[in-house]
Amino acid sequence: MVAILEKRRLRDFDWVLTLLAVVISLFGTWMIYNAQPDAGYWKKQLIGLGVSAVVMLAVAFTDYRKLVHIAPAFYAFGLVLLVVVLIPGIGLKINGQRCWIGVPGLGQFQPSEFMKIPTVLMLARYFGRPRGSVLTVRETIVGLGILILPVGLIMLEPDAGQAITYFPLLAVVLFLSSVRMWLVIAALVLGTASIPAAWVVGVKTGAIKPYQQERINVILDPENADRRGFGYHTWQSILTVGKGGLWGSEQKGAASQSQLKFLPEPHTDFIFAVTAENTGFAGCLLLLLAYAVLLTKLIHGARRAPDRTGMLVIMAIVGGLAFQIFINVGMALGLLPVIGVPLPLMSAGLSAILSTSVAIGFAISIRLRRFVN
């Protein structure tokens, strides 16, 4: 019987999804090597990939329902980490943000990346319960409360870019939970109408910093932006992408935008620009195609989930990954402001790759139990 169960597990294991994640991650490591932030950074990324692969398999072969059941404990632990990282002496302050905790031998750990998974589990746990056909206002408020707690702490770091990536998680769950249309329309109208007022208030109160204003202005009025000031990141990224042409730049090494350090943060925020420079339009197209297949596989797994909770977990993950891909690629192409959102499975960093690997592990776990009542 044990042998039959093990054979069935191997048969039902989502090998295509796993292979896609591995290929994209290794491709990302190659791009990090080409970016050369320092001589051994790509080796650290490989170690991170190894750790993430072990964790992903551990999650995949664990019953996701047990993990969802103890989601409040994970959620509370994540909130504690978000508080701890704000403490001077514990949280590392880099570029004006206190977002990281040092991990000997592996670099920095970012609690805000880890917190996405407990947030997804809490949302799926709450909205996956048996209920009426349409969400009530009270249920919607509870969902907002689950989201606002981590987002509020992340804004204290401050890391607006990371905080923004949490909202698609709730949006997808609410949409799939039959949120009342009047609430959706009201939120869209109020959100759109409040943008100009929020901009004016933010500028006058100092909530929107001068560099943030400039990063938005460089998108709205690129011709008049200060290309040596706060518009530097965007313009250098555009130049790097353009240099790649169709098949990748023929000028490597010393002629590289990224290796000459013209392009800031080439291994994290602008890894897509490095990809464009080294592999051209063709390489970027293949990368985006790989992402499309990966997201399609996840959606297919959500459709075959054994329960509503499992479906919500996977679809929230899909929403989060798709949003991050959209934002990061938009930043690299100069279509969106630079807000420091990593490209899933590609950007350097233990926290980001670990968070995405755990998410994929959940999707595989749900698939393995799709015939279980």
Image (cartoon, rainbow, N blue to C red):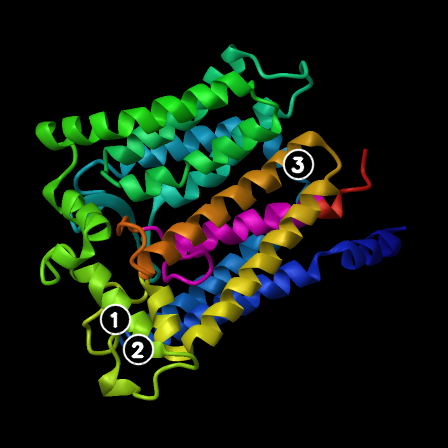
x 36%, y 41%: residue: 112
Identify residue for label 1: 239
Q: Is residue 116 left or right of residue 254?
A: right
Residue segment shown in magenta:
341-366
Q: Is residue 338 visible?
A: yes
Count of marks placed on residues? 3
Q: Quadrant of the C terminus?
A: top right
The reply to whether the C-beta atoms of the residues labelled 1 and 3 are less than 8 Å apart is no
CA distance separating discs 2 and 3:
44 Å
Identify residue for label 3: 310
Residue 357 sits inside the magenta stretch: yes
Judged by depth in the image, the label closer to the viewer, 2 or 3, is: 2
Residue 363 sits inside the magenta stretch: yes
The amino acid beneath tag 1 is: Leu
Work out whether residue 151 or residue 167 is closer to the camera in this orientation and state it: 167
SS label for mark 1:
helix
Picture layout, residue 2 above or below residue 46: above
Can you name the residue that lies furthest to the right here? 1
The amino acid beneath tag 2 is: Lys
Work out whether residue 219 or residue 140 is closer to the camera in this orientation and state it: 219
Give the x, y percent position of residue 266: 29, 67
The reply to whether the C-beta atoms of the residues labelled 2 and 1 are less than 8 Å apart is yes
Picture layout, residue 362 above or below residue 253: above
Identify residue for label 2: 243
The amino acid beneath tag 3 is: Gly
SS label for mark 3:
helix
SS label for mark 2:
helix
Mark 2 / mark 3, whichever is N-terminal: 2
Give the x, y percent position of residue 154: 30, 35
x 72%, y 32%: residue: 307
